[in-house]
Image (cartoon, rainbow, N blue to C red):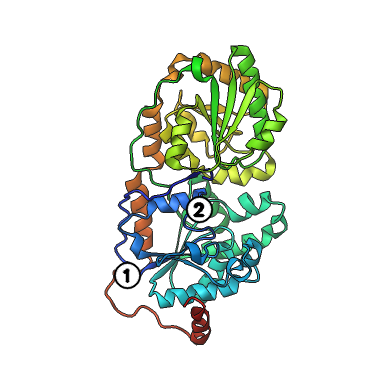
Amino acid sequence: MEGARLTHAPAVEMGLRNYTAERPLLLWTDFPPDHGGGGAVILRSLISEDDRSKVLWVSPALTGVRATDRMLPLVESSLVRTGRRSVFLDSTFLAPALARETLHLAEVHGARALWLVLHGAGVPVAAELIKRGRLPVHVTVHDDPAFAVAMRSRRYLALTPWIERQFGASIRGATSVDVIGEGMQERYLRRYGVRSTIVHRAIVEPVSPASRYDQAVAGLRVGLLGNLYSYSQLPVLGRALARAARTLGVRACMTFVGNGFGERLKKDLAGLEVDVENTGHVDEARAVAILRACYALYLNYPFAARDAVLRETSFPTKLGTYALAARPIVAHAPVGTTLAPLESLTGYVHPWKTMSETDGEDLFVRMWRNEDLRASSHEPAERLRLKYFDPRRNGSALATILDSLVPSFDGRPLWQPRDDRAAHNAIGARHD
């Protein structure tokens, strides 16, 4: 969920029982713990204050300047070696060294198990750690690394088959797997024969009412948060809003929370009756306040054929922030995406299933003329929160999986280092 940073983890009762500060769970992510993206938001929401000391978070994207005693940089990473992060180097040439260093840190800190998010360099590193078989491994998948990420990237497109092989080895070899939704769960059962558990982010506080929307003062304002996957839908949205604004005799505005494509879109929509605002990165509380001042919130998945796996398996983390804003949602996506179940929230989620700006115009005009949509949408938003982001259900599901990696703690020695102790010690010297 880039654009809004969740700075503090809420008090989710995650309840890790089989780990302690002296015998922690080692969490490995390709992004730093304070990252503003959706993966980090999900993890921070699920790790309670009480459990923070039981989790040792390591990352190749973390520097010593930002490290703490529970959040450590990997010194074999491209960032530490060269001063510049290269996911390509960390995923290929440096992956074996990162895996060795991870095991060394696990030994030094007495980790009982490993938890890796399969994103970026986490995919080949997980495959390497599983192959070494030193500790039980749990893996988390938020976006399919091969077909929802690499295949959509010019830089990594050619690596898609290799990334899928590494990914397949990781989820087949892992002790347990959690995923972001039913579409992903079903795909991995069919494609890899792997069963998994669905875990979403946790939102503790109920949705509070938003103020009644003043159309005369605010105009037709649509909020957009974070990563929008591709640019092509945005000019269509902008032109649809401009057409609706002319029909209704109001001014339209697109408010980007996060960097997004705002500056580019300003140029492409120049001369149309639609303003483009760009807030830059803000924390989640501020993002919710900005989105509450919008008439509707824009949620999308791209229409292109290469985006099929993304829209059929991923699930937008920003939906939780949208729920907290208590304003109607426009779901712009083709038929058959993970957004389809949201349509059951009639009057709250409004589908737009084509790339036609005329269809978009008609939708916004109908919404504008529906007086009920000026009122707060907190009641259906709260139902959405409880359906997907219930903290007890998600926190309990994840804690159960992670605890099941190891037996109940009894204080006995957990594992013995192998013959590569000298190599591990050499790596460890670089941490001292």
Q: Position of residue 79 (x, y in %)?
A: 59, 65
Q: Residue at x 68, y 51 (%)?
A: 153
Residue at image coords 52%, 17%: 368
Task: Name the kind of residue labelled 1 in the image.
Answer: Pro
Report the mark closest to the observer, 2 or 1: 2
Residue identified by numbered label 1: 407
Does residue 318 appear to the left or right of 167 in the view shown?
Answer: left
> Which residue occupies 69% across, 22% down?
272
Secondary structure at badge 2 equals: loop
Q: Nearer the viewer, residue 99 or 409?
A: 99
Of the pair 89 and 211, the residue shown nearer to us = 211
What residue sits right under mark 2 in the picture? 35
Percent x, y for residue 320?
44, 39
In the rendered image, residue 100, in percent from the top left (x then y), is placed at: 53, 76
Q: How many marks?
A: 2
- Amino acid type, callout 2: His
Crowd band around label 2 with a 10 angstrom C-alpha radius: few (<14), some (14–19), many (20+) = some
Would you place residue 136 above or below residue 206 in this image? below
* Residue 294 seen anywhere in this rendered image of the structure: yes
Label 1: which secondary element: loop
The residue sitting at the left extreme is 410
In depth, the one of 4 and 107 nearer the eye is 4
Q: Earlier in the sequence, mark 2 or mark 1?
A: 2
Residue 32: x %, y % from top left: 50, 58
Q: Is residue 380 left or right of residue 251?
A: left
Give the spatial CA distance, label 2 vs label 1: 32 Å
